[in-house]
Image (cartoon, rainbow, N blue to C red):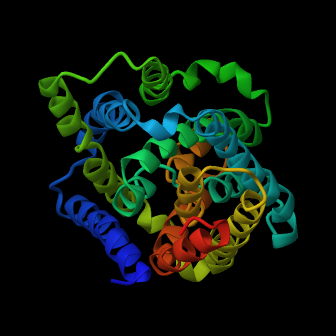
Amino acid sequence: MSQNQVIFEAAAPVFLLIFIGYALRRTGWLSPSADRTLLKLIIGVFTPCLIFHNIYGNQALRQWDNIALAPLVGFLGVALGILTVYFISPWLGMRDPKVRRAFAVTVGMQNYGYFPIPLVTVLFGSEALGVLFSHNLGVEISMWTVGVAVLSGAGALKDWKRFITPPMVTIVFTQSLNLWNPGPTPPILDETIQLLGQCAIPIGILLIGATICDQFKEFQLRKNWGCILNACWLRLGLIPAMALGLAALAPLSVELRQTLAVEMAMPSAVFPIILCRQYGADSVTAIRVAIGTSLVSWITIPLWIPWGLKWLGAE
């Protein structure tokens, strides 16, 4: 089986789950009233279990380059993306401050969770997945500092309490425990954690599909094709080329290079839609960017991942 076919078959279930989530919302089987409860379970229970299962005992995360460089690369990648788009966007006709801020943060920030996790798992296994979670610690910090600063136009550290999320606490705690290495987890506890962790991705992706269904009326391709086209060539073209080009020059581990090849192929994240509403940026722009790049990424993901792996020497 060719690498392209493996990548396509790994990506296909993700998009199928998005479609199922969309259909469940349309039919009323997944009601908006269920979203808050499911989101609490994903953030507070399922994702921490998934993180613990893939970090604890992970040999790759006993290497200091993965421990230190992975979060740093995650932080710099998102910061570089957001700031690059912010300074380019006026040249693309986005001079309204609210539109410009929303466009910059949504385009500059890739989907770093529910899209790449199943792909990294299938393609590279649990060691690379643990490095992905370490990388995502830096992504989260960048989102709540650089991202919030751009969206609000004010100091980001006022929201420092938002850094303390269950997934972030779990990453730091489990990483410390992994370095200490007190011994294997009891089998019953390990299996329970694994089963709970396996719930995170499918339920999370179903909620993404439901969110797209809720916001699809705002997509309006015919009226806003310029915004969507610009988002696609930046998020799915320029930004990954810049990031992978810089990463190729850095002394990164194989697992981190594999993680980056997948992360940089991802469409825009959905969570900036919520941030835009909270900080007064144009959430409709964020909706168009997230939906547009997600649709186009069906084509670009199977192209970017093998190119990225080859570029970074991580095939």
Residue 230 appears left or right of 2: right
Residue 28, quarter of the rendered image: bottom left
Does residue 158 lie above or below 200 as drawn? Answer: above
Residue at left offset 43%, top offset 30%: 167
Instruction: Judge whether residue 206 can be spotted in this image.
Output: yes
Measured as percent of width and height from the top left, residue 217 is found at 44, 67
Measured as percent of width and height from the top left, residue 65 is found at 64, 38
Does residue 121 lie above or below 60 as drawn? Answer: below
Measured as percent of width and height from the top left, residue 289 is found at 58, 64
> Which residue is more in the foreground, 2 or 227?
2
> Which residue is more in the foreground, 121 or 94?
121
Residue at left offset 12%, top offset 25%: 188
Which quarter of the rendering shows the N terminus?
Answer: bottom left
Question: What is the total number of numbered labels drawn onto the structure image?
Answer: 0
Residue at left offset 62%, top offset 79%: 225
Residue at left offset 61%, top offset 50%: 253
Residue 190, quarter of the rendered image: top left
Residue 65 appears left or right of 194: right
> Which residue is more in the foreground, 254 or 48?
254
> Which residue is more in the foreground, 299 or 7?
7
Instruction: Judge whether residue 96 can be spotted in this image.
Output: no
Q: Outermost residue toward the left?
A: 188
Does residue 40 lie above or below 310 as drawn? Answer: above
Measured as percent of width and height from the top left, residue 178 is found at 43, 24
Residue 284, quarter of the rendered image: bottom right
